[in-house]
Image (tube, rainbow, N blue to C red):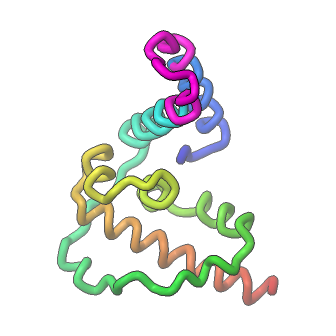
Amino acid sequence: MAATKNDAEDLLQDAFIIAFNKIHQLKESDQFGGWVKRIVVNECIKYTKKNIVVKDVDESMLEDIPEEETEWWKTVDMVIIHNEIKALPEGCKQVFNLYVVEDYSHRAIAQELNISESTSKSQYHRAKQLLKERITKYLAVHG
């Protein structure tokens, strides 16, 4: 969710420092993984709020968004998908990661990033379009 590898490393280090300082708050040791993940996601959201501008959209644009398509991407190598996700514009990438990877709702994303729910939906739709275009082009060239 960070713009660069260095930013991602800094965020991860900050998250582990926070976890170390708050380890006494963890009640069940078997929940450690989920607890640390939540700290990391929260640090990424803070980073997004501070460093990335997610542009608002006109809600009328949402009328043209089609319903979910078939899951064409399931046949594509995950390395290709991962590289293309990393190359998305920052706003799209943040919303896409929160929605798809972290399983946030558009309402939760909107609240966390201080954007409208419509903006979250449109950024997600744009991310999907860009990914499909880029991956389709990649596959056409590289097979």
Q: Is residue 22 magenta?
A: yes
Residue 70 lies left or right of residue 7; in this view the side is left
**14 in relation to 74, above or below:** above
Q: Position of residue 111 (x, y in %)?
A: 25, 47
Task: Give the image quarter of residue 48.
Answer: top left
Residue at left offset 40%, top offset 73%: 125
Q: Position of residue 94 (x, y in %)?
A: 45, 53
Task: Give the image quarter of residue 71.
Answer: bottom right
Q: Is residue 81 magenta?
A: no
- The quadrant of the picture occupied by the C terminus is bottom right
In terms of depth relative to the viewer, which is nearer, 89 or 129?
129
**Which stretch did the figure color magenta?**
19-35
Residue 77 lies left or right of residue 10; in this view the side is right
Residue at left offset 53%, top offset 47%: 1
**69 in relation to 51, above or below:** below
Q: Position of residue 123 (x, y in %)?
A: 38, 65
Residue 94 lies left or right of residue 4; in this view the side is left
